[in-house]
Image (cartoon, rainbow, N blue to C red):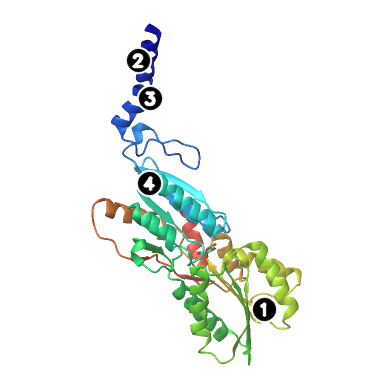
Amino acid sequence: MKDWTGNRIRCFLTVLVFFLIPYLLFGCRKVSFESSEGDAITPMDKNLIVVGVSQVGSESVWRTANTASIQKVFTKENGYFLIFKNARQKQENQIKAIRSFISQRVDYIVFSPITETGWDTVLQEAKEANIPVILIDRKVKVQDDSLYVTWIGSDFIHEGRMAGEALEECLSQRKNTKDTVHIAILQGTKGATSTLGRTQGFASVAETHKNWNILEASDAQFTTAKGEEEMERLLKRYKTIDVLISQNDDMTFGAIEALQKEKIPIGGEDGIIIISFDAVKNALKLVEEGLIAADVECNPNQGEYVEKVIKKMESGEAVAKLYFVPERVFTRENVSAHLLKESGE
Ligand code: AHR
């Protein structure tokens, strides 16, 4: 009889010490989070804002810089607890990540959707859980726009237009004018906002030139390996390619490999004109060398903008539905000054 009572008291005390007291002191909400690095949130961190980020993957140099800009801002020192998940280019992984953020009841969900469609259900679940969703980089096509609070990213249509205008400029500087300009395009991930926007923007300039002949827009998935493979295929298929529009620098690196292997001249007065996107450092060096004629910047530093938006929301301020990050075009005329400035920083 005595033993039974002792056991019950011990049992009660265990529950009190391990479950009830922490629950009452810190609430059930933020004591059980774990970051991607395995860092558990501690009771001391209970005032941190918990941000769940689902990144597309690590397909490009640009993406790595984009991830770094998020990780730089959402630190404990700045008042955040970041749960970062890399979807490795799979929409189902992003959906899984968002559901895990919902079940952990994070304060904000930030994500860069791999493609525009297929998000209605999971975003509805986030809305029902009262968790604000902030989109970065790419957009979603949903029935109900209230499923996300805001979008922060690049004006991809404008980027495509800038590429078209850069090509106009290059062609006008050449002495040998061609009757027909044969253009090959390496496209990024199918259905991604960046692919759709850049394609649309470039097409809007191309259609004003009757002699611009787009041979093919081929899918090279924003990666160097695919860029090289597709360029090799295009070179076998078409006798003349005057221009390559490559929708990111990684594909451009692969395409240059393929062109150099075939000893095809690049740039100069008669070589193939390459216009690229992203403007990562190693590509800008190729602009300086004259291998890339123009590189349209895609600004990866979106972390600071996301934080500004979160701060506004935390203080009850209204936020806009759309924020564009600033971008420009690099050519031989302005690239050296830019690289010098960057190296000094
Ligand atoms: O959506 C932005 C694009 O995605 C970048 O241009 C590309 O490098 C990345 O993978």
Q: Position of residue 197 (x, y in %)?
A: 48, 74
Between 245 and 12, the residue placed more toward the observer is: 12
Question: From the viewer's perspective, is the residue at label 1 or at label 4 nearer?
Answer: 4
Amino acid, disc 3: Phe
Label 3 CB less than 8 angstroms from ligand 1: no
Q: Position of residue 43 (x, y in %)?
A: 35, 32
Camera-nearest label, 3 or 1: 3
Report how many numbered discs are placed on residues in the image: 4
Residue type at mark 2? Ile
Tell me the residue that label 3 is attached to: 18
Label 2 sits on a secondary structure element that is helix
Closer to us: 240 or 225: 225
Dot 2 or dot 3: first in sequence order is: 2
Q: CA distance from mark 3 to mark 1?
A: 72 Å
Q: Is residue 55 above or below residue 106?
A: below
Distance CA(mark 4)–CA(mark 3): 23 Å
Query: What element does badge 3 sit on?
Result: helix
The answer to the question of whether label 2 and label 1 lie on touching residues, with beta carbons closer than 8 A, is no
The residue at which mark 1 appears reads as: 271
Which mark is first along the chain, 4 or 2? 2
Mark in front: 4 vs 3: 3
From the image, which quarter does the N terminus lie in? top left
Q: Which residue is mark 2?
A: 9
Say if mark 1 contacts mark 4, CB within 8 Å. Answer: no
Q: Which residue bears the numbered disc 4?
A: 106
Q: Quadrant of residue 209?
A: bottom right
Label 2, label 1: how far apart the Cα atoms are: 85 Å
